[in-house]
Image (spheres, rainbow, N blue to C red):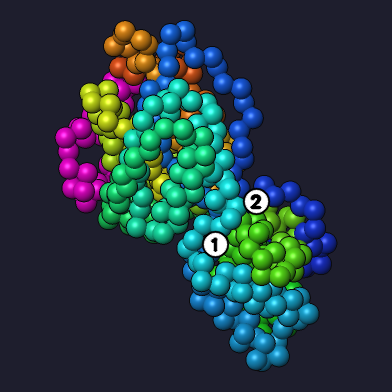
Amino acid sequence: MKIFKALLFCSTLSTATLAQNCPDNFLGTKTLYPAPDQKYAPIPQGYEPVFINHVGRHGARHLTKEVKIAYAYQLLLKADSAKALTEKGKLLKEMILRLEKVEGVDTKSISDEGRAELKDIARRMYAENKSLFSNTVNLNVGITKEIRTKQSADAFLSGLKEGLKTQLTIEQYNDDTDLRFYDTAPAYKAFEQDGPWTPLMEELEKNERIDEVNKALASRIFKADFANNLSAKQLDKFTGDVFGFTTIVYSLKNEILKAGFTAEQLNFKSLFTCTELQHLGQVDVADDFYKKGPGMDVNGIQVRIAVPLLINFIKTTDDFIANGKYTAQLRFAHAETIAPYAALLGIDVADKPTKDLSRINKDWQAAQVAPLSSNIQWILYKKANSADYLVKVLLNEKEARITGLKTNSYPYYKWSELKAFYTKKLNGYGVNMTDDMNKYLQQITQK
């Protein structure tokens, strides 16, 4: 009976109406940046913005690897040579060849959509904090080794410059320790490969019937004899690639048109059913949640690796208070930077751990926490003739509430209290402000 039900499910997926007008809520962290629509709380009387501490994800982007390297690309060519492609398979092959032309030499780069996202964020930053930018503007700009973060910084700065009427000085530096901490912590790399999340993800893939989704897609693309010789691992890899192509084209609208194609000619979404996209999206979000977000434990290694960035935020804010050198500290990084940092800060929409698979999309929505161009800002405010500072924390330009930290003037927190709150958290991890962060990332454990 179980075998019959599985075959029936697979048959249903194979013959169901393929996706046409499905909602795009399967995109997760590949969601294009949603411009905020909230009205900000009035600034407390007598206070003005004096400093901005910012970290942002790169903008909407191209693929990070060449199309021809993808397993799906190579498998399709092999099947084509064997005359094993169905009509849908031939259509997919043509779509992938078009995508290869669209991508050209721009892999790893941000797209036109990404540049527009970042320019708009910068324009809004200027509009909301005009007094901050009314005098000489000195910016300290951090990027990572990836070209898309440099491109993101350039796009952001071009948007910011549009409003400036004063002299601008920019200092730029590379900082993989504070911004790519997930690459430099050996214990985290081990966790990422096989952590305590593994049984939960295996259970989720069964619940979402990913094996059947993989078989259903293969049955549309390949003739039966060819599809039947593919292993479960090969099928999974193939589906993963095609799903990746499905999500990337949202970021490439302008590039598709420039290459002489229409959106419909790269409509990978049409090869799936709406149900399949939801199954794949749920697994994709859960993977990010457990490896980059609060996961099973908000104090777990996948969150604590962001400690260097928190220390850097505190130090650079203190540096401004001490010497006022920079108008803003801007950093451009990755989704793997934003998601754990938002959890570490205790931002209330980003820090809820769970082992309940049904809660993930309720308590942690990837599209709200770490979409393309996602960002976290600390806006520092000062009252004239006073040593008092307030801080407002923004997640994707929306006012954020910090779990466990009280304030009488939400969304504004006293800087002294915010700093003390995070210093206590760091001390709880056995870390202090003077620790060597490279050494910390080398020694971090899963305690």
Prevailing SS of the magenta stretch: helix
Q: Which range of residues does the magenta coloring cover? A: 418-447
On residue 62, the disc is 1
Q: Amino acid at mark 2?
A: Phe
Q: Who comes first in sequence, dot 2 or dot 1?
A: 2
Magenta region includes residue 73: no
Left or right of 445, for residue 102? right
In this rendering, the answer to whether 388 lies above or below 255 is above
Q: Work out whether 376 lies above or below 134.
A: below
Q: Is residue 401 above or below residue 211?
A: above
In the rendered image, the quadrant that contains the N terminus is: bottom right
Q: Which residue is at 61% across, 37% downward?
A: 35
Say if residue 200 shows up in the picture: no
Q: Which residue is mark 2?
A: 26
Query: In this orientation, which residue lies closer to the viewer: 278 or 271?
Result: 271
Residue 263's label in the rendered image is none
Question: Looking at the image, is mark 2 or mark 1 nearer the viewer?
Answer: 1
- Who is closer to the viewer here, 113 or 304? 113
- At horizontal 27% and vertical 31% (from top left) the residue drawn is 325
Q: Residues within 10 Å of mark 2 (few under 14, many from 20)?
A: many
Q: Position of residue 66 (x, y in %)?
A: 51, 72
Instruction: Determine crowd level at label 1: few under 14, some 14-19, many 20+ residues with C-alpha closer than 10 A.
Output: many
Please tell me in which quadrant of the rendered image residue 419 appears. Answer: top left
Going by the numbered disc 1, the residue's amino acid type is His
Label 1: state its secondary structure: loop
Judge whether 133 appears above or below 207 on screen: above
Q: Left or right: where does residue 430 sit relative to residue 229?
A: left
